[in-house]
């Protein structure tokens, strides 16, 4: 299972922002995230990402698209030290990584950059970002715009060209995640965010549309008709209170999709798929909304794996000649032994957990489990950074 969208540094936010203040939403969480992000240097980032990537392997992910915008060091010093930290983290854990470099140039459609956005996320110019991306292109990369809020129309078009140059057209963007973003897009451009991207020629097979929660019916049709790929992040979308994408209609019409762990509040490929189905059950008040003829898991896992492969841009997500031997071995006698194997797979999806994942191979090499003492050390080191970040945020 590829992980189509991750912000590894946000693993440090788990547990923060849950005390009742009244009116908390995505935007209040974002303000908290900025307070944490502005304090993370390369060492902390490498430790947090190594833990997050190890947890991804334990949870059934074998590759990851790391959507990366924490570009500059604390204080704003430019360079590649932060990006190199997450690259090292992937190598240490053994997960297969696509580094998705995200451009950020404004604080909103009509707003300047906020201090942390200017210091940590934004480059001096699009040309400077392009040079930065070329310097990192010895590693597998993709190009991204953070969002239509954070990038102007002219720069969006230029980023699409840069994706063609450096990443075979692989282009990621957060889009239509929030209702206010949709309203801002309609006010500024006369259309919703995905329709705006389509006018710029960016809705095509290389587009990885992350969330699209509040895309309207015509925009969902655009994604399908243009052959774009959707990356859903059900745990994070629930965690942030974003809303539910109407995935049943999208799947019925043959839309391509994958899953991502996004904020990494809970890293679990199985749980992403389970929540995807359960969210639809709560909305429709009916069971088995997303099942196919063979059941629920035999549809959701392979479809998500195929769409995830598009997001990471590797020949993964399938077991066949020519694909990388990135394999997850499942073993649980209470779920899989006896009877119809498709029923066992459904039992895994609905009642299983990460404990059913016994071994993980990347390129045929065993990467999970790792020695328990080493895993404990990774957790302890990351825990030290998390504790320091929590204390720094608590004291302003």
Image (cartoon, rainbow, N blue to C red):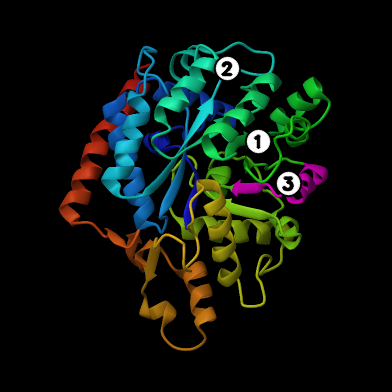
Q: For mark 3, give the secondary structure.
A: helix
Residue 379, relative to residue 160: is it above or below? below
Instruction: State the CA–CA distance, disc 2 to disc 3.
Output: 25 Å
- Is residue 119 something one can see in this rendering? yes
- Classed neighbour count for the residue bearing mark 2: other residues with Cα under 10 Å, few (<14), some (14–19), many (≥20): many
Rendered location of residue 315, percent (x, y): 49, 56
Q: For mark 1, give the secondary structure.
A: strand
Marks 1 and 2 close (CB-CB < 8 Å): no
Residue ID at (59%, 48%): 232
Which of the labelled discs sits on residue 267, or is there none?
none
Residue in the foreground of this view, choosing between 23 and 3: 3
Circle 1 residue: 175
Instruction: State the CA–CA distance, disc 3 to disc 1.
Output: 12 Å
Q: Which quadrant would residue 172 be assigned to in this image?
A: top right
* Camera-nearest label, 1 or 2: 2
Circle 3 residue: 223
Which of the labelled discs sits on residue 105, or is there none?
2
Q: Give the range drawn in magenta.
A: 216-231
Is residue 222 within the magenta segment?
Answer: yes
């Amino acid at each position: 299972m590829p992980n189509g969208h991750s912000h590894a540094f946000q693993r440090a936010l788990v547990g923060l922002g849950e005390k009742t203040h009244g009116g908390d939403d995505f935007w209040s969480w974002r303000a908290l995230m900025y307070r944490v992000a502005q304090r993370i240097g390369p060492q902390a980032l490498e430790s947090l990402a190594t833990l997050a990537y190890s947890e991804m392997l334990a949870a059934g992910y074998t590759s990851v698209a790391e959507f990366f915008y924490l570009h500059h060091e604390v204080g704003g010093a430019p360079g590649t030290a932060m990006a190199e930290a997450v690259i090292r983290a992937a190598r240490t854990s053994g997960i297969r990584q696509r580094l998705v470099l995200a451009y950020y140039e404004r604080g909103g459609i009509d707003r300047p950059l906020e201090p942390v956005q200017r210091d940590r996320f934004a480059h001096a110019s699009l040309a400077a970002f392009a040079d930065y991306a070329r310097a990192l292109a010895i590693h597998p990369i993709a190009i991204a715009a953070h969002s239509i809020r954070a990038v102007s129309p002219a720069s969006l078009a230029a980023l699409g060209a840069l994706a063609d140059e450096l990443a075979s057209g692989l282009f990621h963007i957060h889009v239509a995640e929030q209702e206010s973003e949709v309203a801002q897009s309609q006010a500024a451009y006369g259309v919703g965010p995905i329709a705006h991207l389509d006018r710029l020629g960016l809705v095509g097979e290389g587009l990885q549309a992350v969330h699209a929660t509040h895309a309207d019916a015509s925009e969902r049709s655009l994604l399908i008709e243009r052959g774009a790929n959707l990356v859903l992040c059900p745990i994070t979308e629930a965690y942030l209170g974003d809303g539910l994408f109407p995935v049943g209609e999208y799947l019925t019409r043959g839309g391509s999709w994958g899953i991502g762990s996004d904020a990494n509040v809970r890293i679990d490929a199985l749980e992403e798929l389970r929540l995807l189905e359960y969210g639809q059950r709560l909305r429709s008040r009916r069971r088995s909304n997303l099942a196919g003829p063979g059941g629920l898991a035999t549809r959701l896992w392979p479809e998500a794996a195929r769409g995830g492969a598009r997001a990471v841009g590797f020949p993964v997500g399938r077991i066949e000649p020519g694909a990388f031997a990135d394999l997850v071995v499942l073993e649980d006698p209470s779920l899989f032994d006896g009877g119809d194997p498709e029923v066992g797979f459904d039992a895994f999806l609905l009642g299983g957990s990460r404990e059913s994942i016994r071994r993980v191979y990347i390129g045929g090499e065993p990467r999970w489990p790792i020695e328990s003492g080493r895993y404990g050390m990774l957790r302890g080191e990351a825990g030290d950074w998390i504790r320091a970040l929590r204390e720094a945020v608590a004291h302003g």
